[in-house]
Image (spheres, rainbow, N blue to C red):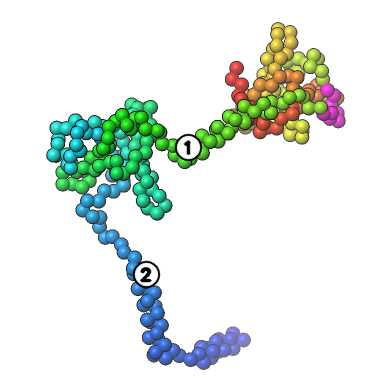
Amino acid sequence: MKRLLISTAVLALLSTPALTETQQDDAATSAGAQIQSKSDISFSLEPASNSIFGSDFIGARLYTVEGEVPETYLQDAEADWNDIGEISNIVMSRDGNVQDILVDVGGFLGIGEKTVAVKMDELKVISDGDDVSQFFVVFRSNREQLEQAPEYVYPSEREEADMREARDERRADASYMPTSAPQIDRDGYTHVPQDDLTVADLQGAPVYDANDDNIGEIGELLMADPTKLGDVVIDVGGFLGIGEKHVRLPLDKLNIQRADDGDSLRAYVNSTREQLEEMPAYDG
């Protein structure tokens, strides 16, 4: 059977008409046209004599100089050169144009400095001799203008700031504080009046939302007076106590249920885990 299949394939190949010489020439011409279209791409073999590499530009110190900026450092070596910052990054558009040069200015040893964005035409690169890798970058204006410029905010930092602002607005929303204790009854449990509770009862008691999801535990109790319980501090979130958040709730906003077959307690609140985590942290 295998020989039959091979023979059939060979027969089909032999029966295929061969390309004529003209057809072969046309195919070669077409392939050449495709190669020619791709050969339009140009590649640089070496940089221009006055090229500056981005790796040298980023990290370069930025200066101001009194009076007119010279063409080379050697022309005015005695000028009052003021080191005002360091070029930290280059912002480019998606089409390859330089949008901004980011400069870190002010501060001391990196502490207290801020990043500002300047346009490339506000800077001047002057040579320090014949070696193109040796140059100075000069800001055409003065230090005060840079220090008074608004701070540049990276997009990721702006997004984080917006998220923090939205979170703070949610925390300021009183709806996250439960207005009352949930009115619930659970089989096998009985409601415990607030006056019948003790610190020993509540310390470490698990906290549940209205859907019976465990969302935290009571970590601390605050006294309204020497003889009366006031507020509770609920530990919410985190893992094995790491990263958890402490939030404060009035005791009367909890529904305390005691198991009928023992001394275990459950505390129910009219809030979800996420709502408790959005509340201001208790740092008492």
Residue 189 located within the stretch drawn in magenta = yes
Q: Quadrant of residue 181?
A: top right
Which amino acid is tagged 2? Answer: Lys
Which amino acid is tagged 1? Answer: Glu
Circle 2 sits in a helix, a strand or a loop, which is it?
A: helix
Left of 262 or right of it: where is 173?
left
- Residue furthest to the top in view is 226
Residue 135 located within the stretch drawn in magenta = no
Numbered badge on residue 38: 2
Residue at x 77%, y 35% (from the top left corner): 211
Task: Specify start and end residues of the magenta stretch as a single range.
Answer: 184-191
Which residue is nearer to you in this view: 237 or 152?
Answer: 152
Residue at x 69%, y 21% (from the top left corner): 249
Q: Position of residue 38 (x, y in %)?
A: 37, 69
Q: How many marks?
A: 2
Which quadrant: the C terminus?
top right
Q: Position of residue 130 (x, y in %)?
A: 15, 46
Q: Position of residue 143 (x, y in %)?
A: 29, 30
Between discs 2 and 1, the one toward the N terminus = 2
Callout 2–callout 1 Cβ contact below 8 Å? no
State the separation of the CA atoms marked 2 and 1.
42 Å
Which residue is nearer to you in this view: 194 or 182?
Answer: 182
Count neighbours of disc 1 (C-alpha within 10 A) and say few if under 14, some if 14 to 19, many if 20 or more.
few
Numbered badge on residue 157: 1
Count neighbours of disc 2 (C-alpha within 10 A) and say few if under 14, some if 14 to 19, many if 20 or more.
few
Q: Quadrant of residue 139?
A: top left
